[in-house]
Image: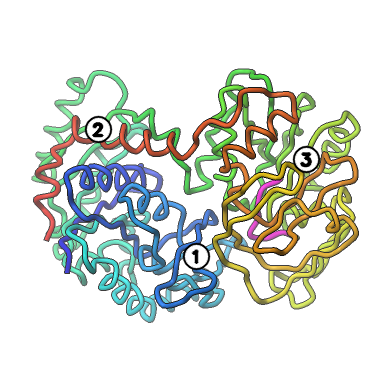
């Protein structure tokens, strides 16, 4: 079994995903065979990973572990994230186990389900370390949620079962970091406290020496060693974001040649589809929160994926975005719908089996002459395709329920494995597709932007991600005692 270390946070969104990715890249640069692992993840940003032994299709994992696999220089595996929760409502989620749909559960029911899921977690844990020198594990939420400790599979419940030493991550940017680290020490039971070898401080801005007294205070309260203080990592902004919580902090940047408006759907999924556009120097991507109109000066509106198409479609209308979208079209604006967003662009979405909930049909936005019927079987696969409008190669993945038909599908947006996908309006300005990762194809993205009047697009996006991972790793090597952290592994 490979040696392992684990990063747990004093709370959610403290930066564990980027830190694990950076440490994975740093370990790889040292010549180690390294793998990422996250026992349980909650996100509607999913990736498709291969399932060992299965030739066709694939399974779902969190995008974070997909990114961390890239940092390790290895192909993603469903065993890197054995349990994935995909929220569908305020109280319930779809449960994915080792890449496959396991069922649906309300929050209370899921707590009772965790005991059965630990077996899958430990099974994947045994598999992910095969042939590796080091596994770097990412926790979820906080180990200080002691009300959930008895059934925990994501933090100390896993660390104690697998005997993995823990480094605690505190986020100074949100304030109260001394209390959050010391408070975690205070309320953890002794068995869990013994698993923590030390801590690090993340997202520091300014002169680190100003926090020397803070570090002394934490040492006084906890006795834990500090492995370093990580500055605000600018390169992290160039990496795919996993959790939709980050959308609450995204604001419009400086005005650029093309403004792309993206409505922030309540169950938005795979919004990292927009990252390659954000990376283009002439493109401004604006995520529009509920209650705000779609900007009238947008040249392109992208309706992203959704984990609850009908529910988000109804909210789309409640926000008045349907009227904004029609006005955008009348001005000659372009529209792209991806996956659930593609389904919303049609005349009707039907869910006769109530897969998404109690509302079984909803009128679509009417920009494409298509109709979608939800079906129980989920399509999950990585794909290579070809853009029909631009006759250029595409590469991405599909994760969706539903079958879409109608006259506009006779003008497909892509051909995937010899089969037509998506639809295009008669004037070519409305495009729908089931394929995520559409904008990740540099040649296509450049030509698409050129069709919108933007020349010089089509940067090497994957190379940008690789450079960002290298920069994060270099910063961690500078500001953390990486030798000591890697030496903890057992």
N-terminal of the pair, mark 1 or mark 2, is 1
Is 428 rendered above or below residue 281? below
Quadrant in which residue 191 is drawn: bottom left
- Pick whichever, 46 or 442, lies toward us: 442
Q: Residues within 10 Å of mark 1 (few under 14, many from 20)?
A: many
Q: Position of residue 230 (x, y in %)?
A: 25, 32
Magenta-colored stretch includes residue 411: no
Disc 1 to disc 2, C-alpha distance: 30 Å
Magenta region, residue range: 303-309
Q: Position of residue 256 (x, y in %)?
A: 64, 19
Mark 3 secondary-structure assignment: strand
Is 325 rendered above or below residue 450? below
Q: Residues within 10 Å of mark 3 (few under 14, many from 20)?
A: many
Q: Which mark is residue 474?
A: 2
Q: Position of residue 283 (x, y in %)?
A: 62, 26
Disc 3 to disc 1, C-alpha distance: 28 Å
Q: Is residue 248 left or right of residue 143?
A: right
Mark 1 secondary-structure assignment: strand
Magenta-colored stretch includes residue 307: yes
Q: Which mark is residue 101?
A: none
Q: Which mark is residue 335?
A: 3
Give the residue at x 67% y 48%.
Answer: 304
Q: Position of residue 65 (x, y in %)?
A: 39, 55
Give the residue at x 14% y 34%.
Answer: 217
- Pick whichever, 188 or 161, lies toward us: 161
Give the residue pinned by disc 1: 60
């Amino acid at each position: 079994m490979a040696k392992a270390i684990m990063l747990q946070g004093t709370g959610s969104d403290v930066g564990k995903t980027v830190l694990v990715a950076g440490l994975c890249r740093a370990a790889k640069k040292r010549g180690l065979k390294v793998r990422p692992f996250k026992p349980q993840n909650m996100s509607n940003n999913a990736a498709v990973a291969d399932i060992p032994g299965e030739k066709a299709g694939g399974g779902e994992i969190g995008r974070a572990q997909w990114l961390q696999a890239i940092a390790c220089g290895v192909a993603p595996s469903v065993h890197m994230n054995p349990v994935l929760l995909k929220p569908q409502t305020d109280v319930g989620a779809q449960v994915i186990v080792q890449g496959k749909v396991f069922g649906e559960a309300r929050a209370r029911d899921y707590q009772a389900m965790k005991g059965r899921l630990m077996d899958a977690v430990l099974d994947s844990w045994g598999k992910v370390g095969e042939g590796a020198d080091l596994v770097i594990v990412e926790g979820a939420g906080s180990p200080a949620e002691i009300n959930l400790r008895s059934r925990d599979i994501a933090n100390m419940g896993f660390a104690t079962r697998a005997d993995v030493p823990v480094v605690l991550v505190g986020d100074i940017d949100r304030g109260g970091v001394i209390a959050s680290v010391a408070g975690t020490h205070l309320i953890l039971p002794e068995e869990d406290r013994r698993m923590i070898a030390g801590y690090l401080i993340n997202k520091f801005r300014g002169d680190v020496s100003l926090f020397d007294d803070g570090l002394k205070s934490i040492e006084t309260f906890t006795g834990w060693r500090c492995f370093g203080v990580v500055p605000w990592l600018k390169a992290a902004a160039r990496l795919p974001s996993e959790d939709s919580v980050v959308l609450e902090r995204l604001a419009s940047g400086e005005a650029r040649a093309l403004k792309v408006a993206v409505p922030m759907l309540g169950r938005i999924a795979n919004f990292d589809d927009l990252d390659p556009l954000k990376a283009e120097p002439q493109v401004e991507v604006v995520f529009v929160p509920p209650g705000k109109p779609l900007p009238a000066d947008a040249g392109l509106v992208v309706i992203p994926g959704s984990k609850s198409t009908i529910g988000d479609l109804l909210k789309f209308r409640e926000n008045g975005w349907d009227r904004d979208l029609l006005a955008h079209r009348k001005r000659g604006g372009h529209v792209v719908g991806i996956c659930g967003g593609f389904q919303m662009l049609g005349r009707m979405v039907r869910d006769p089996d109530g897969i998404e909930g109690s509302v079984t049909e909803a009128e679509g936005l009417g920009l494409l002459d298509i109709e979608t019927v939800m079906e129980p079987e989920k399509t999950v696969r990585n794909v290579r395709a070809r853009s029909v409008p631009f006759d250029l190669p595409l590469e991405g993945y599909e994760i969706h329920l539903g079958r879409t038909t109608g006259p506009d599908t006779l003008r497909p947006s892509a051909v995937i494995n010899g089969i037509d996908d998506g639809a295009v309006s008669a004037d070519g300005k409305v495009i729908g597709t089931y394929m995520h990762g559409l904008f990740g194809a540099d040649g296509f993205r450049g030509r698409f932007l050129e069709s919108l009047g933007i020349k010089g697009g089509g940067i090497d996006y994957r190379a940008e991600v690789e450079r960002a991972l290298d920069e994060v790793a270099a910063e961690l090597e500078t500001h953390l005692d990486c030798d000591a952290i890697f030496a903890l592994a057992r």
